[in-house]
Image (cartoon, helix red, strand yellow):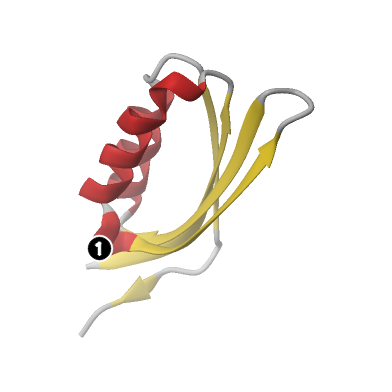
Amino acid sequence: METRVAVISIIVEKNENTDKLNNILHDYSAFVLGRMGIPYRKRGISIISVAVEAPQSVVSALSGKIGRIDGMSVKTVYSNETYTED
């Protein structure tokens, strides 16, 4: 199986939907390398970066599910390298 490292950047504009976000991230926790969240209280938003390693289809599915949550903006950046598990 080929995997890629990616960073999923999320801007949360509606904090009442963070439970949905956390449930989705929990479902994909096997692929999550790390997560950093920054509450930007002045603007009432949160900025979250999630580093993952997974097949591209899994990363796309994860970011797509997050993007369908009301009040979430999502962008994904992929590494150029692919990795193959033995």
Furthest residue toward right: 42
Furthest residue toward front: 41
Residue 75, x across and y down, in percent: 56, 35
Where 23 sits versus 13, above or below?
A: below
Residue 5, x across and y down, in percent: 46, 63
Instruction: Give the residue type at disc 1.
Output: Ala
Dot 1: within a 10 Å radius of its alpha carbon, few (fewer than 14), some, or many (20 or more) residues?
few
In the rendered structure, the answer to whether residue 34 lies left or right of residue 48 reads left
In the rendered structure, the answer to whether residue 66 lies left or right of residue 57 reads right
Residue drawn 31% across the image and 29% down it = 20
Q: Secondary structure at mark 1?
A: helix
Residue 22, x across and y down, in percent: 34, 40
Residue drawn 28% across the image and 39% down it = 24
Residue 44, x across and y down, in percent: 68, 23
Where 14 sits versus 39, above or below?
A: above
Q: Which residue is mark 1?
A: 30
